[in-house]
Image: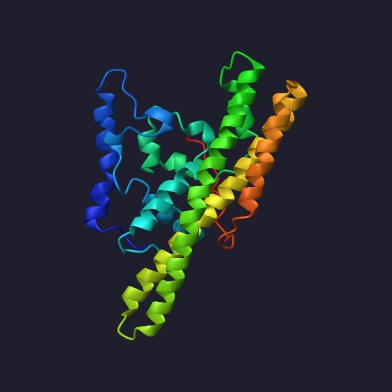
């Protein structure tokens, strides 16, 4: 993997400085309306690490080229689909949005279909209806998010195919230029594949939660959740934009001595 240039290393320190400012403000949080980060802590490259992380997990090279506007947008829209739905309201979400917590990046690759249900049960809802409403809200929010994501994913894939054809027709392209371009094509494809894979894992978590809620706390809302989940799964299946690659297995967690 190539090292990041000095100006990129400097940008990676920005989130910690921003978080420090937030912590100095009484009762301050990095979360604004609708679970979004406060505008003051957002920069254009907030999710640039997503493509790099996907490439690193697949053992692929990382490009030194600047991201295009579409590539920035792809990563911005991918992150909420990769991040577990129960992490959206973290007070320190800015740290996670910038990918500066190694433990969090490990969690992003964990595949545990029971985790969502356990979080749902531990959330402190006053009634069964509250748990069903949270499940429905999370499923519907994903349905809303995946349309824009797959739209930009199709556009990026199309542009990458044109990029590759253009390189084949230009004899003056140097080997480093070609390598960086191909590495970026790989990052884009792996970002899309990561989001698609995460969506499949989310559906498994939603399915587990719904089935266990129906047994433990049956409600009429279960039928509505079943319809919403089926809709989400259909839309995911209809948008297999890139082949699913092989991502490296999550390394085991070693307890501190």
Residue 191 visible in the snapshot:
no
Q: Quadrant of residue 239?
A: bottom right
Nearer to me, 118 or 45: 45
Q: Residue furthest bottom?
A: 171
Tell me if residue 147 comes above or below residue 176 in the rendering. above
The x and y percentages for residue 199 are: 58, 46
Q: Residue at x 26, y 30 (%)?
A: 20
Horizontal and vertical percent position of residue 177: 32, 74
Nearer to me, 180 or 158: 158
Decide which of 111, 85 is in the foreground and name it.
85
Residue 151 position within the rendered picture, expressed as x and y whole percent measured from the top left? 49, 55
What is the x, y in percent for residue 50?
42, 51
On screen, residue 22 above or below 4: above
Q: Identify which residue is drawn at 57% across, 42% down.
A: 143
| Colour basis | rainbow
Relative placement, left or right, of 77 versus 172 is: right
Q: How many marks?
A: 0
Q: Identify the image quadrant of the N terminus.
A: bottom left
Relative to residue 151, is residue 165 depicted above or below? Answer: below
Residue, far top: 126
The quarter of the picture where residue 165 lies is bottom left
User: Residue at the spot x=34%, y=56% of the render?
Assistant: 69
Residue 251 appears in the picture as rendered: yes
Relative placement, left or right, of 131 versus 37 is right
Task: Residue at 40%, 64% (x, y): give it.
Answer: 184
């Amino acid at each position: 993997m190539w090292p990041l240039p000095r100006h990129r290393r400097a940008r990676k320190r920005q989130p910690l400085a921003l978080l420090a400012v937030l912590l100095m403000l009484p009762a301050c949080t990095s979360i604004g309306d609708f679970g979004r980060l406060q505008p003051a802590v957002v920069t254009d490259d907030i999710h640039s690490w997503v493509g790099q992380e996907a490439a690193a997990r697949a053992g692929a090279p990382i490009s030194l080229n600047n991201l295009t506007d579409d590539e920035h947008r792809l990563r911005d829209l991918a992150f909420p689909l990769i991040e577990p739905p129960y992490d959206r309201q973290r007070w320190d979400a800015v740290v996670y949005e910038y990918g500066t917590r190694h433990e969090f990046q490990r969690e992003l690759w964990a595949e545990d279909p029971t985790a969502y249900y356990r979080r749902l049960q531990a959330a402190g809802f006053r009634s069964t209806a509250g748990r069903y409403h949270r499940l429905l809200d999370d499923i519907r929010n994903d349905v809303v998010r995946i349309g824009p994501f797959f739209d930009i994913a199709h556009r990026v894939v199309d542009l990458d195919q044109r990029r590759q054809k253009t390189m084949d027709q230009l004899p003056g392209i140097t080997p480093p230029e070609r390598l960086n371009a191909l590495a970026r094509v790989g990052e884009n494809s792996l970002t899309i594949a990561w989001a698609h894979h995460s969506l499949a894992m989310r559906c498994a978590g939603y399915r587990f939660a719904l089935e266990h809620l129906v047994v433990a706390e049956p409600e009429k809302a279960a039928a509505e959740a079943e319809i919403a989940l089926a809709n989400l799964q259909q839309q995911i299946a209809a948008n297999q934009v890139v082949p699913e690659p092989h991502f490296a297995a999550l390394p085991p967690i070693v307890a501190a001595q």
